[in-house]
Amino acid sequence: MEKPLRSVVIAILCVGLLMVPTGAGVAGAAKAVGNLNLGVIADVKNLNPYMGYGSSETFVIGWVYDTLLGWDSDEGLVPGLADSWEIKDGGTSVEFKLNPNAKWHDGKPVTAEDVEFSFNFIREKRFPSFMAIIGNLAGAKAIDKHTVRVTFRSPSSNAVRFIATAPSILPKHIWSKIDDPRNYPNLDNPIGCGPCAVAERRDGQFITLKNLGNHYRSSLNVETITLRVLRDETMGIMALRRGDLDALLWSVDPAVAEEIDRNPKGYPNVKVAMAPSTSVRTLMFNLRRAPWNDATLRKAVSLAINQKELIDQVLLGYGSEQGPGLVVPSDLHYNKALGPVPRDVAKAKAILDQAGYVDKNRDGIREDKNGKPIKLEILTGNLPTSINLAELLVYQIKQIGIDAYFTPLTAESLRNKEQAADFDAAVSSVSFSVPDMMFYYAHTSRGVINEGRVAGFNYGGYSNPEYDKLAEAMLVEMNDQARIKLLRDMQAKLAEAYYHIPLFSSNVLMLYRDDRFTGWTVEPDSCINNSTTYSNLVYKGGK
Amino acid sequence: MSGAYWARRLLQTALILFIVVTLNFFLPRLTPGTPAGHLYNDPRLSPEAKQEILAQFGLDKPLHVQYAVYLGNLLRGELGTSFSYRRPVSEIILSRIPWTLVLTLSSFLVSVALGVALGAAAAWKRGGHLDTILLSASIVVSALPSFWIAMILTLILAFYWPVFPAYGMVSPHVPVGWNWAFIGSVARHAFLPVLSMCIGGIVGYGILVRNSMVEISGEDFVRTARAKGLSENTALYRHALRNAMLPLVTRIGMSLSGLVGGATVIETIFSWEGMGLLIVEASRSLDYPLMQGTMLIMAVITILANLCADLAYARLDPRVKLK
């Protein structure tokens, strides 16, 4: 998935992730001790739950406000503000039963009317971050004090996940009085029903959250969480080393992780946490363009790729090899039958020979069926790691007699080329942790060209009626097991197509100290920044 | 200074401002990407939803219409609402300027005062120890980027020998206001960034004054001052230095806009929430109203600073006539 979008999807889902309860019962206020200091790059610019998109903003919003449900990478949907939920009317409505003990920070009870208000507010005020679901959201209605029904125009399995885990529930008695909610930064004493309230904040400097200790579900064990804003990554690492911070909430460069792993004495008490990400770097082909519309040729290229070498050279070893299904093993819907394809240059050459792509003039480059030498232009980003990756790819692909070369472009130029379908192949990335994306990145309708631009994100123009059928069924399948089966079948289709050839998945690398707090828990993608960590953290003492 | 001069000058200023305002509007829009990109690029969005998002940011209308709206707002004194902060741009800028001035004004004053004193003294005893040190320092410092100086100072004075805070503007829990705890906390936090900026500034102003003084000290009027039996200090400060100030005034005039524009690199390293960092943030997030607001303030200050420098020239050198 493209980086800006990916960050927004992750940011929105983070609200839900932080809501995942990991302990039973109400956490006692007396147990919460210790002040946790976390380094962040981004400032908290606004705390409007429907307008705050930055990573620090969603972190704070996730602690101050609650969502109906949470998302757990193993279990899927889990209770949040709602204790239970039931999908009705063939997937066009969901009924949520709220926890009767939930209270707003000002002491008023959270009721179904607040949930009704929140969803109707999103629909009426047209907040841009929810625009993708507004069209399918018919409305919400309080059934009784603690029961609310949300209705959709058409059944959609992901709509349930999104509507339940992304939008925070707002107190009606406060937000109904706000005239211009899209331009309301909500920085002064935001009232939510989450485990924490904002205790102190200074623009661009820090924000301190206080654990109120009376939440109906949270098992947060620390007394306060302070986000310290550090605009410079090096300064953040130095501050962590000095002990000012307990962890950094951004993924550090592999070179930093390698330095700390190699020289632990130079960084006393500092640890590197490593988690697989859900994003896969790929080599995407333009299937509209000959000779790359031939799957045999693409298959040969995939056999020429040495993922381990790419990981060692580009990521200094901090990554993992991925299978052609493009879904990472940590995702619930991963198809285990589709493991990484080992490099096999001899087999690749044999396939090319058999398909008639041979080097007749013995210049080291194979010719296509019209006698023209096979050239492959690979578009890539212009950052050093992207160039490094492209250089290695070119080297590996040349081994099978294809004249590969790369062209570095700015992110915007690269996207323009992709949207205009003006490329042979491009270094890309996909993330299918939100399963619907398998529809949006590979369904035929998303690759149609209108007025010279590709309509969706299927830039390479992959088109397979069988895949389309599976994808359409997946979107409306409400049964989890049946949906997972469809998703696995879709991965098998993608694997056969060699449309996106996997290159690797880079690890998320975060730094933390283990001298003041223990209990840091690593989870895929979120690394140490997840609800399990915050429930498990135990204060050991120290300044 | 005649009335005609002022009329011409005002006309020039208005013209320059109009050009700046126009460039200010169009340049951010030439930057690749759209401000709503992070929302706009959701593959699930229908074309209608995309259009609605653009409309919410006021970007759905033709450019000339957007430009007219922008000019209209400016005439009413409105800089718009920031896309990312969801607050008025003027409010954000006003909250940043005092913090930037803490850094830039203190480093500017220290740099000018010490630079002028050192430069004058070095030139007066040309070839002496001070002169040699200043010349050598200018070569070394001009080869060192400010971020490197800042990092080294931080390593020494904030980490190996932790005397000063390494980042931020004030410690948590310190009550904001005119109290000693707050002033002391800000001063401690400002020390390293100001020092990082001063090193280059002192040497820069020092060399400028030194070179100007070297040129002036060979002039007849300086020889006359000495021949009249005036003290060395009088000849130096009353006669030579005053005449050597002209290039300094030009440089100061040019630096004045930087006082409000902040020091982007230093502010980033020390997480100092000033104007420099704001400009970077606005550009990164393609926050058009914020980009326009910050650039406009900078442009206005540059224009005013140039005007002030011209006036100062006339005061310092009677040969300069403003016509």
Image (cartoon, rainbow, N blue to C red):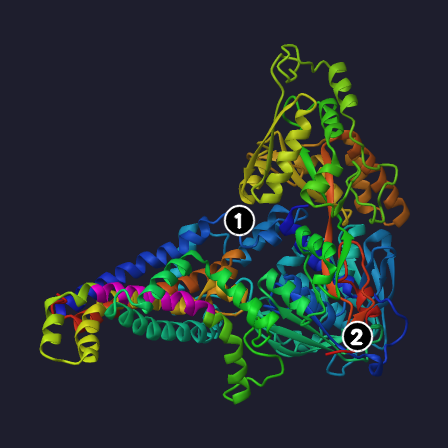
Q: Quadrant of the C terminus of chain A?
A: bottom right
Q: Which is more toward the observer, A263 or A362?
A: A263
Q: Is residue B22 left or right of residue B31?
A: left
Image x and y of residue A450, in percent: 59, 35
Amino acid at dot 2: Thr
Residue at coordinates 63% horizontally, 25% vertically from top-left? A289
Q: Secondary structure at mark 2?
A: loop
Q: Is residue B303 visible?
A: no
Q: Is residue A152 magenta?
A: no
Q: Is residue B208 magenta?
A: yes
Q: Quadrant of the N terminus of chain A?
A: top right
Q: Which residue is mark 1?
A: B33
Q: Is residue A249 visible?
A: yes
Farthest residue toward the front?
Answer: B128
Q: Is residue A266 left or right of residue B33?
A: right
Chief secondary structure of the magenta span? helix
Q: Which of the 4 quarters of the picture holds residue A223?
A: bottom right
Start and end of the magenta stretch? Answer: B196-214
Q: Which of the 4 quarters of the picture holds residue B7?
A: bottom left
In front: mark 1 or mark 2? 1
Distance between the Cα atoms at labels 1 and 2? 42 Å
Q: Residues within 10 Å of mark 1 (few under 14, many from 20)?
A: some
Q: Which of the 4 quarters of the picture holds residue B94?
A: bottom left
- Residue A408 versus residue A226 in the image, above or below: above
Image x and y of residue B149, in percent: 49, 63
Image x and y of residue B125, in percent: 25, 69
Q: Which residue is mark 2?
A: A111
Image x and y of residue A174, in percent: 67, 77
Q: Which mark identifies residue B14?
A: none
Q: Is residue A376 left or right of residue A502?
A: left
Q: Return the chain for callout 1.
A: B
